[in-house]
Amino acid sequence: MQIRYKKVTTINEFIDAIRIRVDVFIIEQQCPPGWEPDELDKEAQHFVAIADNSIVATARFREDPKG
């Protein structure tokens, strides 16, 4: 299986990335609803991992304003 990584460039990729985070944090780890997604998504860069034409992982990156 080949896995490739890319920056999120479409709304569909962003929605799939958010779905993964909701599955992991809200459903699996039972964080309170509303915890994901959050306001930091607006300023973050989002990335996904794709295997067999499906998004299987996600990450986001943002610089801390305090450095």
Image (spheres, rainbow, N blue to C red):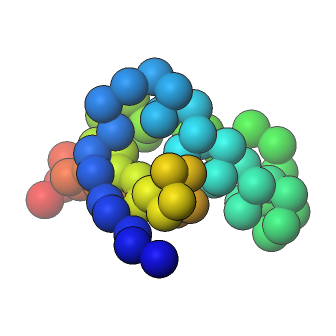
Position of residue 30 measured from the top left corner of the image (x, y, whole percent): 86, 63
Residue 17, picture quadrant: top right
- Measuring 20% from the left and 52% from the top, which residue is drawn there? 63
- Measuring 72% from the left and 60% from the top, which residue is drawn there? 25
Whether residue 55 is situated above or below residue 8 in the rendered picture? below
Q: Quadrant of the C terminus?
A: bottom left
Q: Nearer the viewer, residue 3 or 65?
A: 3
Residue 45, picture quadrant: top left
Whether residue 42 is situated above or below residue 60 in the rendered picture? above
Position of residue 12 measured from the top left corner of the image (x, y, whole percent): 51, 27
- Measuring 72% from the left and 62% from the top, which residue is drawn there? 24
Position of residue 6 measured from the top left corner of the image (x, y, whole percent): 28, 51
- Residue 27 located left or right of residue 66: right
Whether residue 21 is situated above or below residue 34 in the rendered picture? below
Whether residue 42 is situated above or below residue 24 in the rendered picture? above
Q: Nearer the viewer, residue 45 or 52?
A: 52
- Residue 40 located left or right of residue 55: left
Q: Is residue 58 visible?
A: no
